[in-house]
C-alpha cells in the first residue's frame, strides 16, 4: 500500500430527472436535502415536481461533480469514480468543503485499510473547487521533524501548509499555467 489521490471535477449533464434505485436522481445536491426524493408514492413526486417546476426551490443538476480515487501504485492505478453528484452550481466553497471532508472521513474508515492513506487532492481551476481545497488542505503546518515537514521543507518555493491529517492539495498544473499566461498577457500587453 502506498496511498491514494482524491480527484474531482465537474461535467455538463442533461437537465432531467432520472430513476436511481428507488429515488429520483438528477436533482441538485444543494437543494434536494430539503425534499423527499424517494419514489414511494405519487404525492411525494408531485411535491418534488412542484419544487422544481413551480416554486423553483429545487433544481435539476446542470453539472455533475465526479469524485474519483486514484491509487498511487505501479499496478491497477486507474482512477475509480466513487461519487457522481448533480449540482445546480449554487454551492459555495465552504459547502463543497463539507462534502469533501465527508468523503475523506468515509475513505479513512472504508478505503484506507485497502488503499493506504489519502495523500493528495487534485482538481481543476474552478474557483469553488479551489476555495474548498484551500479550506481543507491549507489549514495547518506539519510538526517539525515529521516526515511531511521534512518532505515539504525541501521543496523550494512551496508553502508548508497541509490538511489536519497531512494531505496536500495538488492543483492541476495546466490551469495554473493558463492563469499565469493570461496574467502575463494582461500585464505585459502594452
Image (cartoon, rainbow, N blue to C red):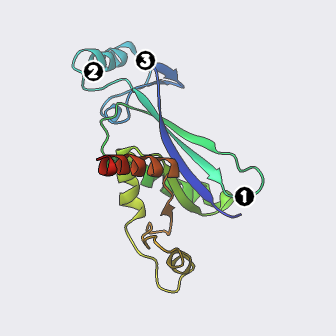
User: Residue at 46% across / 82% down in the picture?
Assistant: 143
Whether residue 63 is visible to the viewer of this picture, yes or no, is yes
- What kind of element bears circle 2? helix
**Which comes before the other along the chain, label 1 or label 3?**
3
Q: Name the residue under label 2.
A: 51
- How busy is the neighbourhood of tag 1: few (under 14 within 10 Å), some, or many (20 plus)? few
Q: Mark 1 points at which residue?
A: 73
- What kind of element bears circle 3? loop
Closer to us: mark 1 or mark 3? Answer: 1
Exactly how many numbered labels are in the figure?
A: 3
Vertical relation: 69 (above or below) 33: below
Closer to us: mark 2 or mark 1? Answer: 1
Vertical relation: 108 (above or below) 33: below
Q: Which residue lies furthest to the right in this view?
A: 75
| Left or right: 126 in relation to 146 | left
- How busy is the neighbourhood of tag 2: few (under 14 within 10 Å), some, or many (20 plus)? some
Label 1 to label 3, Cα distance in Å? 38 Å
Foreground of the two, 66 or 111 = 66
> Can you tell which quarter of the image residue 140 is in?
bottom left
Residues at circles 1 and 3 in contact by the CB criterion of under 8 Å: no
Amino acid at each position: 500500500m502506498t496511498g491514494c489521490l482524491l480527484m474531482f471535477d465537474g461535467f455538463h449533464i442533461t437537465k432531467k430527472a432520472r430513476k436511481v434505485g428507488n429515488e429520483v436522481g438528477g436533482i441538485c445536491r444543494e437543494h434536494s436535502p430539503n425534499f423527499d426524493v424517494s419514489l414511494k408514492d405519487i404525492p411525494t413526486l408531485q411535491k418534488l415536481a412542484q419544487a422544481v417546476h413551480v416554486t423553483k426551490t429545487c433544481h435539476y443538476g446542470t453539472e455533475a461533480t465526479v469524485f474519483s480515487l486514484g491509487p498511487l501504485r505501479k499496478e491497477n492505478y486507474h482512477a475509480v469514480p466513487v461519487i457522481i453528484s448533480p449540482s445546480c452550481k449554487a454551492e459555495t466553497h465552504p459547502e463543497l468543503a463539507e462534502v469533501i471532508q465527508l468523503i475523506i472521513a468515509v475513505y479513512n474508515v472504508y478505503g484506507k485499510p485497502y488503499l493506504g492513506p489519502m495523500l493528495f487532492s487534485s482538481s481543476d481551476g474552478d474557483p469553488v473547487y479551489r476555495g474548498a481545497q484551500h479550506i481543507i488542505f491549507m489549514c495547518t503546518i506539519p510538526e517539525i521533524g515529521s516526515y511531511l515537514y521534512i518532505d515539504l521543507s525541501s521543496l523550494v518555493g512551496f508553502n508548508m501548509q497541509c490538511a489536519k491529517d497531512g494531505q496536500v492539495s495538488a492543483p492541476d498544473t495546466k490551469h495554473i499555467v493558463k492563469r499565469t499566461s493570461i496574467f502575463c498577457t494582461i500585464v505585459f500587453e502594452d
